[in-house]
Amino acid sequence: MWPFKPSPFLDEDTMRWHVDIVCWYLHHFGQKPVVTESRLILPGPYHYKLDGLEGEELGRGIFTQTKALAHMSQLDIRAPNNDGEPNDVYRMVVLSARRVARSVVASAPKRPPVNRDEIRAVVDIVACMMGFGIFIANHAIIDTYYYRHGTKGGDALIRSSTADPDCILSERDLVFDIALFLSFRGLKPNGAFDYLEKQLNEQLGDALRSAAAFTEELKAAAW
């Protein structure tokens, strides 16, 4: 029947589950810099300054910069252990973002509205709402990346092939979380379209259309 109504990006119950978690987060932290100053964090030299760093020094640098980018430099927490490729920048950013997000979740005066076995998913959703969704989503699928130093023209991101075994959210879940973040913050999606892996990029437009229906609810939760 014309006009056709586009199908929602996720089923209604799943979208409501995500929105309820984001509303919980915004209710408790919506007036703090972790929310009010959040921005979409992009790979490459735009936000992370890693020239000359390798190994443990690279890991510490990423962790320190991740806390600063999340406006949570005051957190007194230890850097995560990196037991994988020592120069895997993507993985270290994801581990660092999760460490910060886990601390934020634990500091809330009320538990998130989920079962205990879903806390890992809450941590990734909060990390996306802190601006790290590009890293979380790309790392969750086939490819991840590490830094190679001394290449012509500067450092380069080189592909390796290890999907993220710690992510329990689907790729559509993660794209929807990125869309919720962009819609809530009123940010242009250009950076997300530029840096999401192709199979995620192709889903973002539909996700943004579905996320737009929840923007006012999210803004109300932050006050």
Image (tube, rainbow, N blue to C red):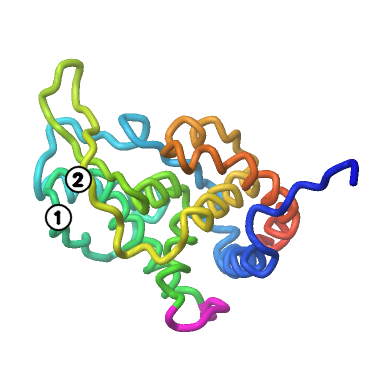
Which residue is farthest bottom?
Answer: 116
Query: Residue at coordinates 76% horizontally, 47% vertically from top-left?
Result: 6
Q: Nearer the viewer, residue 97 or 120?
A: 120
Asked if residue 75 lies left or right of residue 115, the reply is: left
Residue in the picture at 60% in, 34% down: 188
Q: Any mark on residue 88, and which?
A: 2
Residue 9 locus on image (x, y percent): 65, 53
Identity of the residue drawn at 29% across and 49% down = 93
Does residue 167 lie above or below 203 as drawn? Answer: below
From the top left corner, tell me how far across and down residue 205 is, in percent. 62, 39
How much space separates mark 2 and mark 1, taking CA atoms? 7 Å
Looking at the image, the residue that sits furthest to the right is: 2
Query: Residue 22: x and y, percent?
Result: 59, 63
Do residues under tags 2 and 1 come within 8 Å of each other at their CB atoms?
Answer: yes
Query: According to the image, label 1 marks what residue?
Result: 84
Does 98 sit left or right of 116 as displayed? left
Residue type of the residue flagged with mark 2: Asp
Disc 1 on helix, strand or loop? loop
Q: Which residues are magenta?
A: 109-117
Residue 33 at what x, y percent from top left?
51, 53
Q: Nearer the viewer, residue 184 or 190?
A: 190
